[in-house]
Image (cartoon, rainbow, N blue to C red):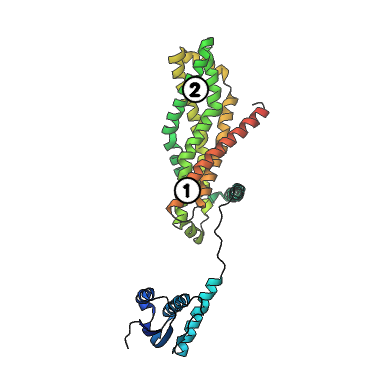
Amino acid sequence: MSLAAQIRAEPDRLLLSGHWTAGSVQLLERQISSLPSTAATVDGRGIEALDTAGAWMLQRLLLRLAEGGAGADQPAVHGLSPAFSRLLDLVGQRIAAQASRPAVPAAKAPSFTGRLGQSSAAVFSEASALLAFIGEISHAVLRCLAHPASIRWRPILFNIRSAGVQALPIVGLLSFLLGVVVAYQGGEQLKPYGANIYIADLLGVSMLREFAPLITAIIIAGRSGSAYAAQIGTMSVTEEIDAMRTLGIPPLEMLVLPKLAALLIALPLLTVFADVLGVLGGMCMASVQLGVSFVEFADRFGKAVSPTTLLVGVGKAPAFAAVIVVVGCFQGLRTHGGADSVGRQTTRSVVQAIFLVIVADALFSIAFSTLHL
């Protein structure tokens, strides 16, 4: 007999022959589709080979004949060997079980309260992980202080150069322009009252207390904080962090602490640099717009601005530095998957760092106001 599966229709009878296997599924599909949906006797004595795919096609043939029989019972296959009959019955039972299984309802989109709850749970989970990360960093800092020989000075100096020295041009330029803008806007308000000289008071206090430390921290968060997250995130994706742990190298001491120490040194110095450039920009604008000479401005500036004002602004910088480093490294270590995860965590680190820097600045303002500083 032929090896190809075949269905031959005779009056009130279907003769099945050949190999009803996975290789004949397409051929059987065409033959079953072309058969009329009428009740008929099925003769399977000519089937020489039958596997699960063939048994499934044979069950489809029987179901088609049963539908054509106007609700009659499903016809049986006569002449099958006992092994083929058992396989056919097993496939039929699985098909019946799947047909009787209740349909899984489609998942509904969560409501507003559901989305709010999910977002709140995600924020709480991330905040808890961040607090745990801060605890790990604190423990690592204490361990390094107890064993000064373990401090890695070369990475610290490298990060001071990359996050501090190389950031001088952009910090200086933006601070100078910010001083120009503050002096211009303030001068427009002071000029009608003939209080031009008080631009030194306005510019000195605003730049030294608020604008210089805040703009410097935001620039460093976007420049260095994103670099920290991208660097550590890439190392996480390429499994370099796991390799360091395998070699017994603590990732926090190797990657996080040098960045923290470097930015704690660099950011206050960058803030002082921003103070100088911001005041210089304001002096230039005051000279051009208000007719206040550099000598007059400097004389009034020395009387209006106390050392406490400078120390208040510079004192915020270490806190801002800690926020930037902790958030950037935290998001980098949470990177999983591929390159898209690196970009996502880097973006998240910049947004969170800037947000927390502004929150910290607001808290400092409240505290200094309470202390009358």
**Residue that protrudes farthest toward the top in the picture:** 194
Q: Is residue 357 above or below residue 17?
A: above
The image position of residue 94, as x and y in percent, is 52, 76
- Check whether the beta carbons of the residues at disc 2 and disc 1 lie within 8 A of each other: no
Residue at screen point 56% across, 71% down: 100
Horizontal side of 50 relative to 307 (left or right) equals: left
Residue at screen point 43% across, 41% down: 162
Q: Which residue is mark 1?
A: 344
Is residue 124 something one can see in this rendering? no
The image quarter in which residue 97 lies: bottom right
Where does the C terminus fall, quadrant-wise?
top right
Is residue 363 something one can see in this rendering? yes
The residue lying toward the viewer, choosing from 308 and 230, is 230
Q: Is residue 277 above or below residue 26?
A: above
Horizontal side of 234 relative to 143 (left or right) equals: left
Q: CA distance from mark 2 to mark 1?
A: 35 Å
Of labels 2 and 1, earlier in sequence is 2
The kind of secondary structure element at disc 1 is helix
Q: Which residue is mark 2?
A: 182
Q: Amino acid at mark 1?
A: Arg
The residue lying toward the viewer, choosing from 240 and 150, is 240
